[in-house]
Amino acid sequence: MYLVFWSFFALICVVLDFVQAIPSCDDACLFDTILRPRLSTNASIVHSSSAAPRWSEFNPPQTGTVVNVATEHDVLLTVQYCIAADIPFFAQSGGVGWANTFSLGKTGTTINLRGLNEVTFNEKRTEVTVQEGTIIEEFINAAYQNHARVATGNCNCVGVMGAALGAGVRRLMGLYGLTIDNLISMNIVAADGKAKVVTPENDPDL
Ligand SMILES: Cc1cc2nc3c(=O)[nH]c(=O)nc-3n(C[C@H](O)[C@H](O)[C@H](O)COP(=O)(O)OP(=O)(O)OC[C@H]3O[C@@H](n4cnc5c(N)ncnc54)[C@H](O)[C@@H]3O)c2cc1C
């Protein structure tokens, strides 16, 4: 936790120092100069919202920047950067969410999680670890290959976590419950920029 605090504090200092030193550097320049060198090699930053395609063009979040994260640590750093630089941000996994509340504007940032799509079953196939950008098609295919059943949504293109955040409904829920009924633990980055592992024991409310 101390490490997270100090990395967050250090990032705020870097952002403030840089903005004072080069006031002509715009948001895109700041992303490329401050955040990009800290991300993993396979991550990328694109200054166009079309870099993260969505299922529907109805009221999509037209953000100015897409950060394609490649590791969990990239997610943490990007959230911390956006908080430090006062940039509104939005997580996207399946890109199927359909609402008129995604107005972040050109100064906003999409954190595109689709690169994080590994699905790993334990040896007995009683537990599965799903990365946050996995879509239902990938989850079901992995379950089929492992001769397992999983509690997730029905539609292939939907994000597993996106559906889970709304409970996660599908045909097998009469037997196994909703997706959220089956969660054992989650690695999250909270809105305050801190990473934590949430379980029913250490955070029953969340
Ligand atoms: C054609 C269609 C079929 C559907 N079928 C089903 C179904 O069978 N079962 C079901 O339960 N629901 C279903 N839904 C509803 C679907 O679960 C929701 O629309 C859900 O929000 C989509 O998630 P997404 O990741 O695809 O979309 P996104 O637009 O990527 O995300 C939706 C919301 O969740 C947030 N979010 C997504 N992933 C993360 C993450 N890893 N961490 C933090 N925040 C995150 C986003 O910021 C956004 O606010 C369906 C919707 C459509 C349009």
Image (spheres, rainbow, N blue to C red):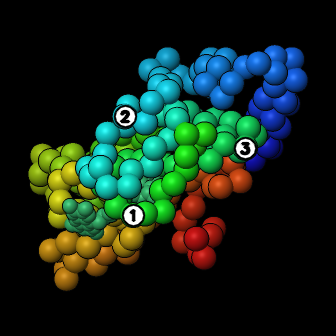
Which three-letter amino acid code belongs to the residue tagged 1? Ala
Q: Quadrant of residue 86?
A: top right
Q: Are marks 1 and 2 in contact (CB under 8 Å)?
A: no
**Other-residue count near label 2 (Cα within 10 Å), few / some / many at <14 / 14–19 / ≥20:** some
Residue drawn at (38%, 31%), measured in percent from left and top? 51
Give the distance between the C-alpha atoms of the residues marked 1 and 2, in whole angstroms.
18 Å
State how far apart marks 1 and 3 are (Cα): 23 Å
Q: Residue at x 55, y 50 (%)?
A: 104
Horizontal arrangement in the rendering, residue 126 relative to residue 10 (left or right): left
Q: Is there any visible trace of residue 119 in the rendered image? A: yes
* Location of residue 109 in the rendering, given as x and y in whole percent from the top left corner: 55, 40
**Residue 111: image x %, image y %?**
50, 41
Beta carbon at label 1 within 8 Å of ligand 1:
yes
Q: Secondary structure at mark 2?
A: helix
Inspect the image, locate mark 2, and give the three-letter code of the amino acid beneath it: Ser
Which is nearer the N-term, disc 1 or disc 3?
A: 3
- The residue where tag 1 is placed is 99
Quadrant of the image where one finds ligand 1: bottom left
Instruction: Assess disc 3: are there few (<14), some (14-19) or many (≥20) residues with their C-alpha within 10 Å of its C-alpha.
Output: few
* Mark 2 vs ligand 1: CB below 8 Å: no
Dot label at residue 86: 3
Q: Which residue sits at x=55%, y=46%?
A: 105
